[in-house]
Amino acid sequence: MNKRNVLKAKLDIIFKKLFTENIGLLIDLLSSLLEIPIESIKNVNIKNSEILPDSIEGKFVKMDINMEVDGKLINIEMQYGKDYNYRERTLFYWSKLYSGELKSGEGFEDLKQSICINIVNFPIFDCREYHSHFTVMEKNRHEVLTDKCAIHFFELGKISKNANKHNKKELWLQLIDAETEEEFEMLNQSGIAPIQEAVYVIYQMSEDEKIQEAARMREKALHIEVTNMRGARQEGLQEGIQKGIQKGRQEGRQEGRQEGITETALKMLKKGFALQDVKEITGLTGEDLEDLIVN
């Protein structure tokens, strides 16, 4: 039997199509990720359900789902390619979400609880947990300043590969992360109706040639974006190294060159660069980098 060429729900255009065209699935996803009773979700108003043709090939187009849910503002974004400034970007989008609804003449008490949900296809925090929930609180007392700020991150790479029918949150994230028919069939065997329905919808979309082509074009655009960003960052880092080398030459000391390289390596490590990328760009050995991390 021929295997299906199954579309990936973690590709942002497929993610958005799946959940904006199937409101029941979106409600179940929200209930699972935010850990709120599904029956408590009464009204979902999606504000940007359209997927414009010219956005498919747009490298920097944001394929988020912006909605109002029972008086709360919620934005879900599926981030497929790595973004080194994603934390700052998310905080910026949250601030826009929070302040953007306040109309002229309204008071600050009218600001609504605003929740950003980020599902990311790359590591972003140095922890084992796949779910990180941020709010605004006092540093020492841990007193929450307001319940109107909530930012969630779900890291797909930290999800277990074994389907657990008693954990719907993980099942949803496994479905979003799935890339093969075998993975989808494993989830289909969970017996959880919304998950089975989502698998069926993914299969149906995978049979549509127009959707397949749109997914191919979108993935290509995102690949070009990531490649260009990586190239620009490497070019900038190489420039920084050269400045360090030049500094050493001007001062007549080898220490200047080494300081420039070491400083660049530290900045890359703090930004979350992979060790292999740091080694290639700086020329440092794995042992050198281990010393930097330890110290």
Image (cartoon, helix red, strand yellow):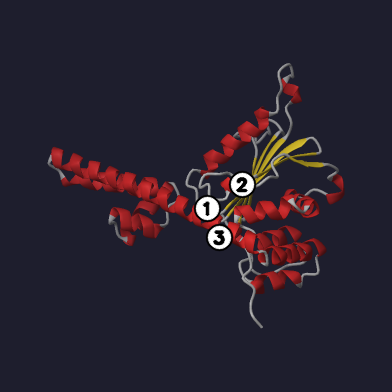
Q: Mark 3 is on which residue type? A: Arg
**For the residues marked 3 and 1, what is the alpha-carbon distance in whole angstroms?**
32 Å
Vertical order, 138 against 196 (above or below) = above
Question: SS for tag 3?
Answer: helix
Q: Nearer the viewer, residue 56 or 258?
A: 56
Mark in front: 3 vs 1: 3
Q: Give coordinates of residue 18: x percent, y percent.
A: 71, 55
Question: SS for tag 2?
Answer: loop
279 to the left or right of 35: left
263 to the left or right of 49: left
Q: Residue at x 73, y 16 (%)?
A: 105
Q: Give coordinates of residue 241: x percent, y percent.
A: 27, 46
135 to the left or right of 273: right
Q: Mark 1 is on which residue type? A: Asp
Disc marking residue 126: 1
For this orientation, the residue located farthest to the bottom is 1
Vertical order, 33 against 146 (above or below) = below
Do the CB atoms of the residues marked 3 and 1 lie less than 8 Å apart?
Answer: no
What residue does disc 2 label?
Answer: 63
Compare marks 3 and 2 and give the one earlier in the sequence.
2
